Image: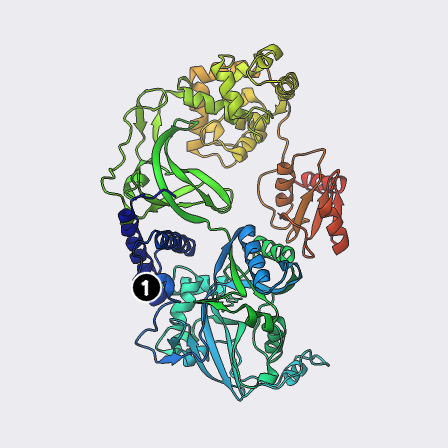
Amino acid sequence: MTSSTQPSGDLARLNALRMEIERHQRLYHGLDSPEISDAQYDALVRELEALESQLSGTGSSVAGDSPLQRVGYSAAREFQQVEHALPMLSLNNVFGQEELSQFGERLATLLGMASAEGLAFACEPKVDGLAVSIRYEHGLLVQAATRGDGSIGEDVTENVRTIRNLPRRIQDASVASFDQGTSKPAVSARVPRVLEVRGEVFMAKTDFNNLNAMQQKAGGKVFANPRNAAAGSLRQLDSAITAARPLRFVVYGLGVVSESDLMPKSHSEAMAWLGAMGLPVASQRAQEVGLDGVWEFVSEIQAGREALDFEIDGVVIKLESFALQEKAGFVSRAPRFAVAYKFPAEEVSTRLLAIDVQVGRTGALTPVARLDPVRVAGVMVSNATLHNADELHRKDIRVGDMVWVRRAGDVIPEVLGAIHALRPPGAKPFEWPLRCPACQGPIERVEGEAAHRCVSGLSCPAQQRQAIEHFVHRRAMDIEGLGEKRISQLLEAGLVSRISDLYSLRFVDIAGLEREGDKSAQNLIDEINRSRKTSLSRFIYALGIRHVGERTARDLALHFQSLERLRQADQASLMQAPDVGPVVAESVVNFFAEPLQSQEVDRLAGQIEFPQVDDRPAVAPAQAGPLSGRTVVLTGTLSTMTRDAASDWVMRLGGKVVGSVSAKTGFLIAGADAGSKLAKAESLGVAVMSEQDFLKLVEEAQGGD
Ligand code: IVH
């Protein structure tokens, strides 16, 4: 992250950050109404942490009240205050496997051990709700308090009593397990005279959606997310309102236990004990020895995150042994024996270094942010889309700003907005170009469309180039080995200036290029030749007609059955094809009517044959396929398809591909030379499928398509 090198600039930034963080703390904790996501908040905190430690080293004065010194937020005056008998602490966060290992190694050193390999850890999901401490005396729920600032919380006893999965009275473990029909009690223990349990009040995703729908209908407050809904529902002065809200509780720890002889020896033992008393404990829990197992649990939970009916933002990892926990101790506001593994932030802030305007395949101009490289969701990002001119101006994003960047799943990274409080002086609004940056041709804006477009079509080099990239793409003509770099080389050498030129390339042309070997040149020639036979649906998609994606291309191929018939179709007959409306129909007609494009299609049609109309099923994730609800791991080398293609198929069959094998893995698909994953699957009794078995499934699905 670049920041001013002058200490005074850094100090100003430090203060601006502190104010910004405090504002968000107020919005989040005080008003249950955040303006930014948790990931964005975490990113701000990380930046402030770095700046505070950097400045404290330079002797600059960073004294003063830092929002990082506080846990949570002061109790609101409307509620009675409760002083916690034992402070309610926070957890330090780690991001990524490396920081997790560092946590383990630090702990091991602290405990005088050579490594973390022999340490036992308890792992459980980090439920995204709000922390509450609940006190039982003689088995009766007598008090409940929010965390507040960690020492003093808000009295929410009446409200917590309305939570339906929380017993108001707890009983001896032996009785409770007997009640549940277990003949032998798992844990036999008396309920202590005073028992404090700590856990999270939260709202299930489905309950949250229903609540919001109801609120909207009734004109009430609509909540931003389940956490805010839970907090807003719990912090009601009228407990009748809370009672009407679908809150839940999950226990994750102990506070005061009056009789020390009743105290369990480890975290898992404590959870079993509390569970046996009838308290709700997390069902996804694991005990792992060493960090490899912990990492596996983390990966598994992360992979299954979406499917859970409650929101989690990470995994909490705690030393099992209470004796070792005590030995490890605490630092300021957090224990040393536990840590929150936060899932990779999908939103982070970084500096916007420049804005370039790119010309897309169909001439659309897109502003692209050049960023100070930053890790987002585990991947380094240095470019992100700013969508279009309107967005750019509406959000008032300027070069030099600190901006929020998001990357969710496989989606292209995008800039969400700027942090205006941190804007450097002199930053100017971006000036939109008046001509196409690639060909200097005119640009136009169609009424009702967000994008500006270069109207030069294939005579614009940017559009030409992207037409080629699209044409050869894996999902189009699937010409392997023609990446951006090689296309650039071919264009620069003048060997190719339009798509059809690919089919006149000779071995000597390619082998003569810089850094080109005979073998790879021949491979490319083979690939190009292989593409001379393809399906009509792939070819239609490969042409890159505006509004014609893979699915429409397939529909058109199946409907018209030949390229000639498609080319001759007028708008009305195009609209006879399934799902083709006036916009698509017009776009197809215009495409083939354009003389340059029409000539190009003629040339291509002379080179390519279509033995098949379509060669793949519709692209839609299966609701109920043979793999539905199963996680699948791919390993080894597959001989009939790429990993990508295999993953696509797993998805179409209803399954989900994950990276590592565990007891919960549904299937392992093992290609040639499968190694440790196969061994592990076998040792865990996970079903192993050969490539042949998998192909059978695929073929069956194709047959039924
Ligand atoms: S253990 C000493 N376990 O995360 C602190 N916390 O950032 C003990 N949380 O305040 C906390 N799920 O509100 C723990 N399984 C879990 C948790 C969990 C959610 C929350 C809790 C805590 C915060 C720490």
Query: Residue 441's spot in the image, x, y percent?
Result: 32, 20
Q: Is mark 1 within 8 Å of ligand 1?
A: no
> Residue at (34%, 34%) from the top-left corner?
355
Q: Nearer the viewer, residue 254 or 661?
A: 254
Q: Nearer the viewer, residue 458 or 105?
A: 105
Rendered view: 153 above or below 686: below
Residue at the farthest left position: 426
> Residue at (64%, 16%) from the top-left corner?
518
Query: Residue 453's spot in the image, x, y percent?
Result: 35, 28
- Disc 1, SS: helix
Decide if residue 169 is on the left or right side of residue 244: right
The 10 Å Cα crowd at callout 1, few under 14, some 14 to 19, many 20 or more, is some
Q: Is there any visible trace of residue 483 in the rendered image? A: yes
Query: Residue 62's spot in the image, x, y percent?
Result: 31, 57
Query: Residue 649's spot in the image, x, y percent?
Result: 64, 41
Say what amino acid the circle numbered 1 marks: Arg
- Residue that mark 1 sits on: 26
Decide if residue 332 is on the left or right side of residue 339: left
> Residue at (42%, 55%) from the top-left corner?
42
Give residue 41's quadrant in the image.
Answer: bottom left
Residue at the farthest front position: 59
Q: Quadrant of the N terminus?
A: top left
Decide if residue 532 is on the left or right side of residue 431: right
